[in-house]
Amino acid sequence: MIQKYTFGTPFETEAVVALLPAASDDLAFGRISTDDGFFFSYALGPDDKVYGLGEANRGIDKRGYLYVSYCADDPIHTEDKHSFYGAHNFIIISSMPDASKPDASPNAFGLFFDYPGAVTFDIGYSHRDLLTVSCDKLDLHLYVITGEGPYDIARQFRRIIGKSYIPPKFAFGYGQSRWGYATPDDFRKVADEHRRHDIPLDMIYMDIEYMDHYKDFTVDPQNFPDFSAFVAEMKQRGLRLIPIIDAGVKAEPGYRVYEEGVEKGYFCKREDGTKFEACVWPGTTHFPDFLNPKARKWFGEQYKVLLDAGIEGFWNDMNEPAIFFSAEGEAEIRTWMEKILQGELSFHSFDFSDHAKALANKPEDYCRFYHDLGGGRRVRHDQVHNLYGFNMSRAAGEAFARLAPGKGILMFSRASYIGMHRYSGLWTGDNMSWWSHILLNLKMLPSLNMCGFLYIGADLGGFGCDATEDLLLRWLALGVFTPLMRNHSAAGTREQEFYQFDHPEDFRHVIQVRYRLIPYLYSEYLKAARNDDLMFKPLAFVYPQDRIACNIEDQLILGNEAMIAPIYTQNAIGRPVYLPEEMMLVKFLPDGTLYQEILPAGHHFVEVALNEVPLFIRKNKKLPLVDAADRVAALDMKTMTYIGYPEAPYELVEE
C-alpha cells in the first residue's frame, strides 16, 4: 500500500508518475515536525536495516552514517564524503523477521521524500538508534509504502515512478574510453589494437577533446574535417562512437548554440535578469535552463547535428551542474588577495590552497541563478538543484523520441534524480583505481536498482590514479555483469587499455565471457524493466529468513538465476562465499572451458585466478550462453547452450 502526504507547496519534480490520492489518515511511522522546515524522525530497532539512497557512500545497509542528498561534483569518493553525483531520496526500513516464526516476512516500510533541494539523512549517525530526515523548507511530498518486505516495497516504489529506460542492445557490449582521445588516429588505434588482439569491442567513447574548444554539439574541424565520414568508417568496422555532452554552453559570439540560447532567453539568469556566468571547460559558460520546458526542448533539438552525423549514443556530463568558479567567486578571491598584498590580512601557506579549492561548486554560486518556470514564476537554483541533471537527460530523451522515433539511442548521465531513470542510465562518475572502489561499485548496484536505475556501471579500472593489471582484471570480473561495461580513465593517469599490459590474452578471455553472457544479461534487464523489478538484489531480499544472508553485502543476486561474489582485495587467491542454498559454482576458465561444481549450502572458500570469472547458479536454475563474437551484432544465437541445472526452465526475453 502507498500513501501520499503533502506538506506546504511542493515543487512538482515529476519523479512520480502514478496518480495517487492524498492520504486521509495520520502517518503511521515516526514523528514529523514542521516548526522549522521539515523534520522526520523514527526510532530504529536494534536489528533494523536501512536500504536505498541509490548512488550513495558506504554499504547496502545505510545505517550508521550521515548522507546529504545534493548532487555534488566531487571526484574523491572516500568514506568521509556525504554526497555523490546523484540524489535519490528513497529508503526502506526493514526489521529482521521473528526467528520463532519461520514463515514471517520482515516488518518493513519505505519512504520517498520528493524534494528537489538538499535533504539530510542521519541514519543512526548522531544517535545509533535514531533515523532523522530533514530539509530547509516545508514543501515536499512524502510517500509511505508498506508491504510484505523490503523487496516488495522496492517493487511497489518502482511501479509509481515509471518504467526504466531500455537501451539498444549494442549498449550491452564493451566500451573503451579515455579522457585524451582527440584525433581520428587515437580512435583508430583503439579499434586496431582490440581487433588485433581479438578483444571484443562495440563502442569507443569521445571525451571533451573531440569538440571545437569544448563547445557542445561541435567537433574539432581540424581533427575531424568530415565527421560523418569518420563515424561511418567506424561503423564499417562494427564500432560506434559515443560522444560526451556537457551541461554548460560556451559564451562565445558567433557560436550558434550560444547565440540562439541568448536570443531566446534559454539560459539561467541572476535575480536582476542578467545572464549568470561561470567558468567550466570552455571558459566563460552559460547554463541552459532545463526546468523551462521551451529551453529543454530547444536543447534537446541540438543533439540532431550529431544524430545526423550517424551518432547513436551520448553521455551527459558536468550536469550537477559543475562550476569551476563564478565571476563573483573570482572577484571575492581577488579582493582577499589584495588585502593580503596590502598587509590588511595575515597569510598562511595553506590559506591560498583552501581558498582556491573553495571556488569550485560554491554553495553561494548555486544561490546566484534562477530558473524560469513560465507565467512569471521563477525558482532559485539551489532549491531545485537535484533536478538539473535529470532534466538535461530528459531534454535529450524527449528529443530522441521526436528526432529518431522507434530507434534506440544510448544515453547515460552523471548527475541524476529519481525520474531520470525513465530517459537515461547513469554511470557512477569519477572514481579511483582503488580496490575499495570495486566494493563500492558492487554495493551501489542494488541501491540504484531500487530507485529505478537499471542501465548502470562504473568506470572499470578507475578513472583517477594509476590502475594495475590485477586490479583491472578483478574489476572487470564484476563489470562483466553490469549493464554498462566501460573502461574509462583520466588524462595523466596510466594508460589502461588492455593492450597496454603484459597479458592482453587474459583481458580477451574476460571480455569474451561478457559477450557469451549478453543474451542472459539483456533478457534479465528487459524482465526487470518491464516488470518493475531489480536486476541486482541484496541476498536479504531473496533469503529474508536467513540471518547470515541478510548481513552479507559483498554478494548479490543477479537476475533470477545467479549470484555474483567478486574479489575486491589485492593479492587474494580467492574469497569466502556464503551460500544460502545449494548452488552450482561456475568458473569461466581462460581456455574457454567451464569449471562446474555443485556446492552445498553453507560457508566455502572459493579460489579464483586473476584470469577467471566466477558465477554461482542457484539451485534448479539455468541460464543461456552463446559463443563469443567481436561485437554484439555478430553474436550467433544458434550457438546457444545452457549452464546450470539441466532440467530447469528458462524464459529468454529478446528485444
Image (cartoon, helix red, strand yellow):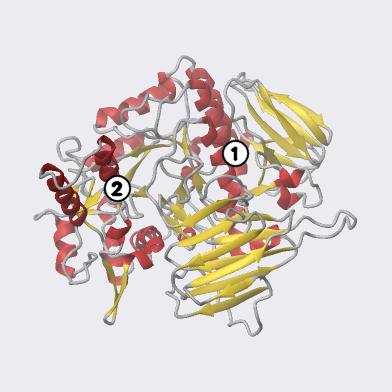
Among the 4 quarters of the image, the one containing residue 436: top right
Quarter in which the N terminus is drawn: bottom right
- Residue 370 at x, y = what percent? 27, 68
Q: Which residue lies furthest to the right in this view?
A: 100
State how far apart marks 2 and 1 are (Cα). 54 Å
Q: Which residue is drawn at 82% across and 37% down?
A: 582
Q: Residue at x 81, y 41 (%)?
A: 581
Placement of 391 over or under 466, stated as above or below:
below
Disc 1, SS: helix
Residue that mark 1 sits on: 637
Type of the residue with mark 2: Ala
- Residue 578 visible to the viewer: yes
- Residue 279 at x, y = what percent? 21, 50
Q: How crowded is mark 2: few (under 14 residues within 10 Å), some or many (20 or more)?
A: some
Type of the residue with mark 1: Met
Which label number is shown at residue 358? 2
Front one among 353 and 1: 353
